[in-house]
Amino acid sequence: MTIGDETIAVYVEELSGYTQDVIDMAAHRTIREWSEASKMPTLAFILERCTNAQLQKTQNILTRGDKPADWVAMSKDEAKAFIEKLKAAQ
């Protein structure tokens, strides 16, 4: 199978916003799940697995057991205010 330079450029550009470990996770899942071995997986198929891998990484951080016993998650409004405060401090 030959993949054109333009196609490669589009895939690389779209995947460039993800970290290497997310891309690795998505690649392994794509290989397991792509049913048409003679064809290149669609970009949408790969991006969906990247998004799922990113969500899994985030969920793993949020559910890990090293938070203090009295830890309480911020509300959406509290998080938004905190982000704005950080931006203002730059």
Image: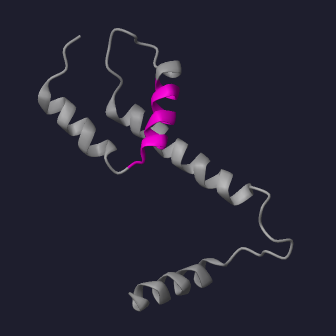
Magenta highlight on residue 35: no
| Applied colour scheme | one colour
Question: Which residue sits furthest left?
Answer: 5
Q: Is residue 20 magenta?
A: yes
Residue farthest to the right, as pictured = 69
Residue 2, position in %: x, y?
19, 14
Residue 21 horizontal/vertical position (percent): 48, 41
- Rendered residue at 69%/59% (across/down): 62
Image quadrant where one finds the N terminus: top left
Relative vertical location of residue 74 with respect to residue 29 in this rendering, above or below: below
Quarter of the figure with residue 65: bottom right
The total number of labels drawn is 0
| Residue shown at 43% from the left, 38% from the top | 23
Q: Is residue 67 left or right of residue 20?
A: right
Left or right position of 8 against 55: left
Please provide percent x and percent y for residue 64: 74, 55
User: What are the residue bounds of the magenta stretch?
Assistant: 18-30
Helix, strand or loop: magenta stretch: helix
